[in-house]
């Protein structure tokens, strides 16, 4: 990434980080119980929940990786963000009401606890907690690595620290996240998410305007790309720029897979009233659509600028956003966007430290039948442990970090989506089916990731999938199949009466 | 009934998606795409059906979503091969326009409006909530 150490950008970033820390300190006084710490006291309204869900769902990938991926692969890569057209409704119709009702009548703060209530099974809850921890360390690791890259670019730390620059950037990022997450838990998390969500929307809309202006409008941009020798018309072909199994696989993975993302599902526990769900798809989906304007705008404008000679060909696709910001936007907007990038990364990261912490101090002790430790105190200790573990993981496996985000998303999707989305709506789903589905999702996703990278691991055979099929899609399809077939064949389970009634409402 | 059918369709779809991912081939790719685009609507039917599995007022947004997604797939396949010479729509080649406007804006409008307009049909009444709390308390005591 090019160095961006202009004064306006640096001071915007410093101001943003200071504001986030201030929210953490302010939230400290509002965090008095485990319920406050893990689900913000179940007192959050529609707008904050909607924007917090949006900012938790969108990491720095939307701002940096997304446009770069389009530059490299063509518009087929936009199938990653296209599902936002329906995912908010899918979430609300399928799981939001049931999760919120569960949290209304039982002390449910986490997805593994929701599954424990639904299936009356510690094993299911424990397996879900393991899936959450595996995905959390990978997802958080990817966010921390991205945070370090942005801090390095904005503050120019490479000149000061040389090769240790990324580690220093990561330590600073972990420090800020830990301070506000430890102090304010989810109260701080949702209010910083609100700030971050607003910042992301403003930055995205601003950049979209400059992207269109730089290329002379949508039609001019598309014509320039289609006529260029470098990109050509196939760049604009949604199902031609990538194999269909890959392009539609992105659509399936990032659409259906949303139902298994604990950092999004977790937000529904916090909603103050069930009736506030009424406008949730509009708020959540609308916010997401405004945010991806940056992804789509730069994904099209940067190739057009390169094709017309307005920009040098990019040395690395991830340079698409910074190169455009430095050359085609006013400095204050560039500063705002980089604060938005920090916001996107940190809002996702803080959700994960909270979820990972809950898995350690609530879900795993419950699964093993151990007494829970003191929630608030140990929850804070666990936040530090999860953040440090993810940072060490990211440093150790730095060269694979770019792939970790997708792997982590697929891990959650394959392990949790069937047990949550089908299990909360169909009484026939048994604990055995849910457990088998979670194990299938975890093992298939992890196994295929290893096998598809078998070139770098001697002795492993190549994966059997071909033609561009994604490992995550295979894992999701396998876990859905296991859960559904098992449930059709197994005897109908007995449910707790309140859970059975809840599933009828 | 609708929910039961959707569950049967989901079972078949997930198994076939798995199969087509492993087998691939031109026909397999298209079949995979058709099933992948139908999957979200099937899940909504499973989630939104009432106690007896009926859809009621939710049928129209769910049906509309299914039709929009599948129509967009057909549109992208039909216009995909002719980006340079084919028709353009709202400043983009037709296939790209279908992908961006058809798959993001149209479903969002259908979903957001459909969900809000039908919300009252699946709203949880205060007395239901109270009954649920009582059941949970009794369950806790047992």
Image (spheres, rainbow, N blue to C red):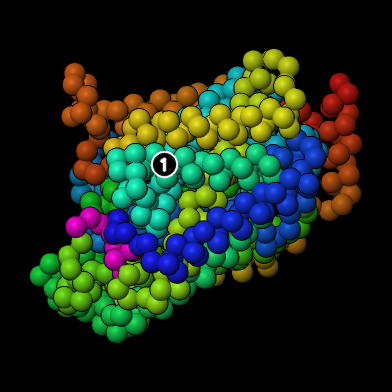
Does residue A426 show up magenta in the picture? Answer: no
Residue ranking furthest to the bottom: A216
Does residue A316 show up magenta in the picture? Answer: yes
Q: Is residue B97 left or right of residue A408?
A: left
Residue A30 point in image, percent of width and height: 78, 47
Q: Nearer the viewer, residue B57 or B126?
A: B126
Q: Nearer the viewer, residue A101 or A326?
A: A326
Residue name at image x 18 percent, y 29 percent: A455
Residue B105 point in image, percent of width and height: 47, 70
Say which quadrant the N terminus of chain A sits in: bottom left
Residue A35 point in image, percent of width and height: 76, 39
Residue that numbered label 1 is attached to: A168
Q: Which residues, given as a range, are shown in magenta?
A: A315-324
Q: Nearer the viewer, residue A193 or B126?
A: A193
Dividing the picture into quadrants, the one containing residue A296 is bottom left
Residue A430 makes an appearance in the image: no
Q: Chain of mark 1?
A: A
Residue ranking furthest to the front: A160
Residue ranking furthest to the left: A229
Residue name at image x 67 percent, y 59 percent: A48
Residue name at image x 49 percent, y 64 percent: A11
Q: Is residue A347 left or right of residue A341?
A: right
Report the predominant secondary structure element of the magenta stretch.
helix
């Amino acid at each position: 990434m090019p160095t961006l150490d202009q004064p306006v950008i640096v001071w915007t970033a410093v101001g943003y980080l200071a504001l986030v820390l201030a929210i953490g300190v302010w939230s400290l006084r509002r965090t008095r119980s485990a319920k406050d710490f893990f689900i913000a006291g179940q007192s959050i309204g529609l707008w904050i929940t909607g924007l917090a869900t949006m900012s938790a769902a969108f990491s720095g990938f939307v701002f940096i990786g997304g446009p770069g991926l389009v530059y490299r692969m063509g518009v087929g890569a936009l199938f990653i963000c296209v599902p936002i057209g329906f995912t908010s409704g899918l979430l609300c119709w399928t799981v939001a009401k049931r999760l919120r009702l569960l949290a209304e009548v039982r002390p449910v703060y986490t997805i593994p606890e929701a599954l424990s209530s639904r299936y009356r099974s510690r094993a299911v809850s424990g397996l879900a907690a393991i899936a959450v921890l595996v995905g959390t360390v990978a997802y958080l690791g990817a966010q921390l690595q991205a945070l370090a890259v942005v801090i390095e670019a904005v503050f120019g730390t490479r000149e000061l620290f040389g090769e240790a620059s990324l580690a220093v950037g990561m330590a600073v990022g972990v420090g800020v996240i830990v301070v506000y997450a430890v102090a304010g838990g989810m109260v701080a998390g949702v209010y910083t998410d609100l700030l971050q969500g607003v910042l992301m929307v403003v930055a995205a809309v601003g950049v979209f305007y400059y992207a269109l202006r730089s290329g002379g409008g949508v039609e001019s941009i598309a014509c320039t790309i289609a006529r260029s020798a470098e990109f050509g018309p196939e760049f604009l072909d949604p199902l031609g720029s990538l194999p269909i199994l890959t392009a539609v696989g992105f659509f399936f993975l990032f659409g259906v897979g949303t139902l298994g993302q604990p950092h999004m599902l977790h937000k529904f526990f916090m909603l103050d009233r069930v009736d506030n769900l009424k406008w949730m798809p509009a708020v959540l989906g609308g916010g997401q659509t405004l945010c991806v304007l940056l992804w789509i705008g730069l994904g099209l404008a940067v190739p057009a600028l390169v094709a017309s000679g307005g920009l040098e060909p990019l040395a690395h696709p991830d340079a698409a956003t910074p190169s455009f910001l430095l050359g085609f936007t006013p400095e204050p907007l560039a500063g705002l966007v980089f604060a938005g990038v920090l916001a996107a990364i940190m809002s996702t990261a803080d959700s994960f430290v909270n979820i990972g912490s809950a898995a350690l101090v609530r879900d795993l002790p419950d699964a093993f039948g151990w007494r829970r430790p003191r929630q608030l105190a140990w929850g804070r200790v666990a936040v530090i442990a999860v953040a440090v573990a993810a940072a060490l993981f990211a440093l150790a496996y730095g060269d694979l970090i770019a792939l970790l985000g997708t792997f982590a998303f697929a891990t959650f999707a394959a392990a949790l989506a069937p047990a949550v989305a089908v299990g909360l709506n169909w009484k026939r789903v048994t604990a055995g089916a849910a457990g088998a589905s979670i194990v299938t999702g975890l093992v298939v996703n992890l196994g295929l990731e290893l096998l598809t990278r078998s070139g770098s691991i001697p002795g492993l055979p190549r994966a059997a999938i071909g033609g561009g099929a994604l490992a995550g899609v295979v894992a999701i399809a396998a876990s859905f199949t296991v859960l559904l077939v098992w449930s059709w064949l197994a005897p109908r389970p007995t449910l707790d009466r309140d859970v059975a009634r809840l599933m009828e409402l | 009934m609708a929910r039961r059918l959707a569950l049967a369709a989901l079972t078949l779809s997930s198994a076939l998606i798995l199969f087509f991912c492993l087998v691939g081939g031109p026909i397999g790719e298209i079949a995979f795409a058709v099933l992948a685009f139908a999957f979200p609507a099937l899940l909504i039917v499973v989630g939104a059906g009432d106690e007896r599995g009926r859809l009621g007022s939710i049928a129209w947004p769910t049906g509309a979503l299914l039709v929009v997604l599948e129509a967009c797939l057909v549109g992208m396949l039909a216009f995909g091969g002719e980006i340079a010479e084919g028709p353009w729509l709202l400043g983009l080649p037709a296939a790209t326009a279908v992908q961006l406007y058809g798959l993001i804006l149209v479903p969002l409008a259908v979903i957001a409006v459909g969900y809000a307009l039908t919300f009252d049909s699946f709203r949880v009444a205060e007395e239901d909530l109270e009954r649920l709390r009582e059941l949970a308390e009794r369950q806790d005591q047992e």
